Image (cartoon, coloured by chain):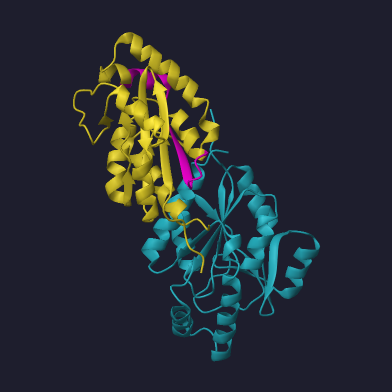
Chain colours: A yellow, B cyan
Amino acid sequence: MTVNRRGGLFVISAPSGCGKTTLSDRLSPSFGIVRSVSFTTRPMRQGELNGKDYHFVSKEYFKKLIQKKEMLEWACVFGNYYGTPKRFVATHIKKGKDVLLVIDVQGAMQIKKSGYDSVLIFLLPPSISALRERLVKRSQDSRGEVMERIKKSRLEMSYVKEYDYVLVNDEIKNALYKIGSIITAERCKVR
Amino acid sequence: MTVNRRGGLFVISAPSGCGKTTLSDRLSPSFGIVRSVSFTTRPMRQGELNGKDYHFVSKEYFKKLIQKKEMLEWACVFGNYYGTPKRFVATHIKKGKDVLLVIDVQGAMQIKKSGYDSVLIFLLPPSISALRERLVKRSQDSRGEVMERIKKSRLEMSYVKEYDYVLVNDEIKNALYKIGSIITAERCKVR
């Protein structure tokens, strides 16, 4: 009998401030999907936990990981490095587990070419003004940084067509339901 | 901005006695999907309603519809004709509605080639013995007919690989959830 998909990568990309962290935190327990925690060299923000939100490491360490080819994908954004460790992903995929990556567009494009069975999901903000509002409300960034992030978001949104699915994160409940549906449906796909 | 899929065909095929009628009856109201009622020349069974379960018509009338090319797909199964009217489908698709077709493998293969945006879902019984049990329990068919249906089911199951999705109808609640997820996910697809 045909076997459904097992052990693939679900990639979620979204402009910052789009609610992707909250979403992915809630997804993992409900859908038996393992979240890959990225490495980053950016400073830890208030409320973040090392090992949960990111593995916070030095630039030297990160560059060493790149050199040793231990990164499945990596990108440099606003001068900070972000990346997904190869070993973590490989271990879980081998066990037939699905792995969730919350990464930016550059990373997602690398995953697409990685040879892994991958499903790319793009989360849109309801509008650019809603995005600006969220970023300002979060008040983790200066005014200049907010503008930079919005500029980057516009650029990222032009990559939507490279993704498999796109949805608007208007309400977290709706978005969760839709992403859950995508995971469930993908698991029913005929290989 | 990218527009999600609108107005496509969702095709469900399953061996008879697999619970597809119950499932599709419950799907239509929850997912804003219009169910196409097939034409058939087979006799009406107890509990069935003309216009709801099928449009029950004569062989002469059915053959005329074929001649006039008014059938989107049709098949002859155990000497009876079954088919989907073109006009009904075209009207709803034009309005951007999704249409649900509950049809057999032969019909599904014709839909795949029809040029319509289509998603093919195959419902499997938990096992052949479970299928036999359901058919006997339903007791609409003679012993010989049950055997014929099981033989046909085995043949149909070899077509699973031509479908987009496959799921086991172990419990109606689970199956409904999965088909609902497929519909929701397909509506989030990037065109």
Q: Is residue A165 visible?
A: no
Taking the view exactly as shown, the residue that stands out farthest to the bottom is B143
Q: Residue A103 in magenta?
A: no
Q: Is residue A125 magenta?
A: yes
Point 47% across, 38% down: residue: A111
Q: Residue extending furthest right?
A: B67
Of B139 and B189, nearer the camera is B189
Q: Is residue A38 left or right of residue B76?
A: left
The structure residue drawn at horizontal position 54% and vertical position 68%, both measured from the top left corner, is: B14
The residues colored magenta run A113-134
Q: How many marks?
A: 0
Left or right, residue A86 beside residue B54: left
Image point (62%, 67%), residue name = B105
Left or right of A26, for residue B184 = right
Q: Is residue A178 above or below residue A107?
A: below
Q: Quadrant of residue B78?
A: bottom right
Query: Where does residue A2 sit, x and y in percent of width and height?
Result: 51, 65
In the rendered image, residue A152, in percent from the top left (x then y), is placed at 44, 19
